[in-house]
């Protein structure tokens, strides 16, 4: 299963840049169709690198994507989680 950026690139949405920081926070990548995208894979040196998530790390990453990314005005925020991800008790 491809990551969100890979799937969107394959759908000809076009992602040609990587996120970068500014004084106000991390700027998302904007696709050719104007969709703002942030993905852990876009922050890795190699996008194909697997990320192993544990509940506390995932929770913190989602929190940081919400607070540290400069989204601007949002109508929707979609969060794509890996299949089978759940909190273990």
Image: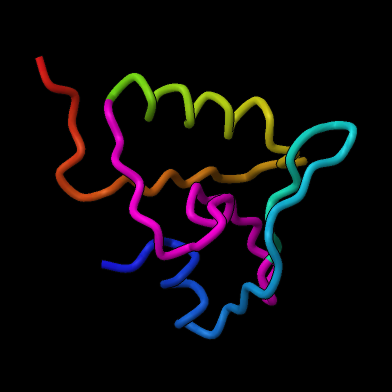
When the figure is inspected, residue 49 is found, relative to residue 54, above or below; the finding is below
- Colouring: rainbow
Residue 69 image point, x, y percent: 69, 37
Residue 32 image point, x, y percent: 69, 76
Front residue of 73/61: it is: 61
When the figure is inspected, residue 39 is found, relative to residue 11, above or below; the finding is above
State the quadrant of the N terminus: bottom left
Front residue of 2/48: it is: 48
> Which residues fall within the magenta stretch?
31-54
Which residue is at the far left? 89
How many numbered dots are placed on residues in this image?
0
Which residue is at the far top? 89
Which residue is at the far right? 23
Q: Residue at x 71, y 41 (%)?
A: 71
State the quadrant of the C terminus: top left
Q: Is residue 49 magenta?
A: yes
Q: Tell me if 70 is positioned left or right of 81 in this view.
A: right
């Amino acid at each position: 299963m491809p990551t969100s950026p890979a799937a969107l690139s394959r759908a000809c949405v076009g992602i040609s840049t990587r996120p970068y920081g500014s004084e106000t926070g991390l700027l998302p990548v904007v696709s050719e169709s104007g969709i703002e995208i942030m993905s852990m894979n876009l922050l890795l040196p190699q996008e194909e690198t697997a990320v192993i998530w544990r509940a506390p790390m995932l929770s913190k990453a989602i929190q940081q994507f919400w607070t540290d990314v400069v989204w601007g005005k949002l109508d929707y925020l979609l969060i794509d989680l890996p299949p089978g991800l759940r909190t273990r008790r």
